[in-house]
Image: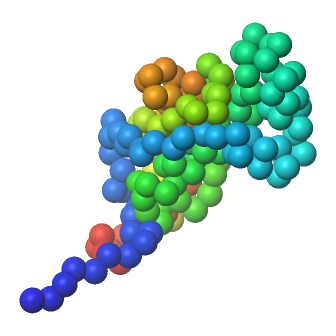
Amino acid sequence: MAGRSWSDPQDKYFEDFVAGEVLVTRGRTIDVGDLTTFAGLTGDHYPLHTDEEYAKKTRFGTRIAHGPLTFAIAVGLVGTSGFYGNAIVALVEIEHLKALKPVIPGDTLRVHAQVVELQPGDNPKYGVLHVNYSVRNQREEEVMAFKQVMLARRRSAGSTRDE
């Protein structure tokens, strides 16, 4: 009996996506190390993210994650899920990014990603994929929302899915 073979990432094309399809990612718990690592990487050492004593006196009562950190984790959760396979060739833009609730250490984030639009585009090699991201915590509260617009490779005329 021959075994099945899988590749990572799997071959995927613009034509494999369907408007309305939804991915729900696995969870990822945010910890203080994420905040300090991100602060070190970006140079954003604003005390709301890095100084617990300062943050205790704010409206949040504790440190909160940087908005761009939440965004990056959301993109990473979808990316590592395999949902896009190797279809994506470029980021076109991020639309309507909104930070809706604070993310604090101990929160577990998941992403609900929904394909909302597929544009064939002018170039026969690429299509434009529009995906809404809803980033939610362990209580299913939406903490961030945005639309990611990406360029995805298309099958060439007459090719098959496995090419």
Picture coordinates of residue 84, whole percent (x, y): 45, 56
Question: In terms of depth relative to the viewer, which is nearer, 43 or 157?
Answer: 43
Whether residue 60 is visible, yes or no, is yes
Question: For this view, does 146 lie left or right of residue 18?
Answer: right
Residue in the picture at 43% in, 72% down: 8
Name the residue: 72% across, 27% down. 64
Q: Is residue 128 visible?
A: no
Which residue of the protein is positioned furthest toward the left in this rendering? Answer: 1
Give percent across and percent down for residue 1: 9, 89
- When the figure is inspected, residue 161 is found, relative to residue 80, above or below; the finding is below
In this view, the residue farthest toward the top is 59
Residue under the point 71% across and 46% down: 33
Residue 49 quadrant: top right
Quarter of the image for the C terminus: give it: bottom left
Q: Is residue 25 left or right of residue 76?
A: left
Q: Position of residue 103 (x, y in %)?
A: 63, 28
**Picture quadrant of residue 26:** top left
